[in-house]
Image (tube, rainbow, N blue to C red):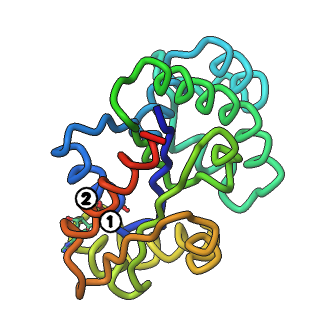
């Protein structure tokens, strides 16, 4: 079974594209939700985060996200330490998940694939592409974040053209091409590759 990564910047349409693959019966691993869950439930992560950031890291047994974000925001070395604790465990969790799946291929949807080194265990990566301004509009419409917050997140992510260059396949979600048609075509390609 092929292990496929699906990535793209905030608002590119990763979740939307993952949902289309899901309608074709492809299993999807949502890395963002899985990481959130592991940060609450994995004892090794809990212990190491508490050692690094102090007792306020968890409040009533739940990760104190606001506290943690305030600590690592604009502190790259501390963010790197946080990632060094969480990434190996979250990546291993996705590998274990892939090993439990059936079918020609399964997909891990993640904003960070190259940044976390998760691409090393993946057979192929799919990038979802949309222009910056369109991504901002879509995230504003989705709600929950203002323009400044969206831009701050974008700045922290790898440059989109660089990311797309590194992907084996790119889905154009810039509004002109049908994404359903692109997903169907890619599905066929991946089924054929898995069959070899
Ligand atoms: P990501 O998971 O990459 O952050 P989403 O899939 O959540 O992106 O898409 C961001 C927002 O844009 C969502 O509200 C989604 O419904 C909308 N969206 C995504 N692709 C399209 C599209 N092709 N046409 C219209 N809206 C779209």
Distance, label 2 to label 1, CA atoms, is 5 Å
Q: Note whether 135 is above or below 102 in the view shown.
A: below
Q: Nearer the viewer, residue 27 or 134?
A: 27
On the image, the x and y values in percent for residue 187 come to 31, 53
Residue 143 placement (x, y as % from top left): 24, 65
Residue at the image position 53 percent from the left and 20 percent from the top: 96
Q: Residue at x 48, y 66 (%)?
A: 169
Q: Secondary structure at mark 2?
A: helix
Residue occupying the far front of the picture: 196
* Count of picture labels: 2
Q: Which mark is residue 16?
A: 2
**Residue 158 x %, y %:** 64, 69
Q: Which residue is found at the position 77% from the left and 37% from the top?
A: 84
* 40 horizontally vs 121: left or right: left
Give me the residue at 64% from left, 43% from top: 118
Say above or below: 12 vs 176: above
Query: Dot 2, crowdedness within 10 Å: few (<14), some or many (≥20)?
Result: few
The x and y percentages for residue 5 are: 50, 49
Q: Quadrant of ligand 1?
A: bottom left
Comparing 174 with 183, the one in front is 183
Element carrying mark 1: loop
Q: Is residue 56 visible?
A: no
The answer to whether residue 161 is visible is: yes
| Pointer 1 residue | 13
28 vs 43, nearest the viewer: 28
Q: Is residue 140 left or right of residue 95?
A: left
Residue at mark 1: C-beta within 8 A of ligand 1: yes
Instruction: Establish whether ligand 1 lies closer than 8 Å to the Cβ of label 2.
Output: yes
Labels 2 and 1 touching (C-beta < 8 A): yes
Seen in the image, is 165 located left or right of residue 109? right
């Amino acid at each position: 079974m092929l292990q496929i990564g699906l990535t793209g910047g905030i608002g590119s349409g990763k979740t939307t594209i993952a949902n289309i693959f899901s309608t074709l019966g492809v299993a999807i691993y949502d890395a963002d939700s899985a990481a959130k869950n592991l940060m609450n439930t994995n004892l090794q992560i809990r212990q190491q985060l508490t050692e690094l950031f102090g007792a306020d890291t968890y409040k009533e047994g739940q990760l104190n996200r606001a506290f943690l974000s305030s600590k690592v925001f604009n502190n790259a070395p501390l963010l790197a330490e946080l990632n060094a604790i969480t990434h190996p465990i979250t990546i291993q969790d996705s590998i274990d998940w892939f090993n439990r799946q059936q079918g020609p291929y399964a997909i891990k949807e993640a904003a960070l694939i190259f940044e976390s080194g998760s691409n090393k265990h993946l057979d192929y990566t799919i990038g979802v592409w949309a222009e910056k301004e369109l991504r901002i509009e879509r995230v504003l419409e989705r709600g929950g974040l203002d323009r400044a917050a969206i831009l701050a997140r974008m700045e922290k992510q790898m440059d989109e053209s660089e990311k797309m260059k590194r992907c084996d396949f790119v889905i154009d979600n810039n509004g002109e091409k049908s994404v359903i048609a692109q997903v169907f075509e890619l599905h066929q390609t991946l089924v054929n590759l898995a069959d070899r």
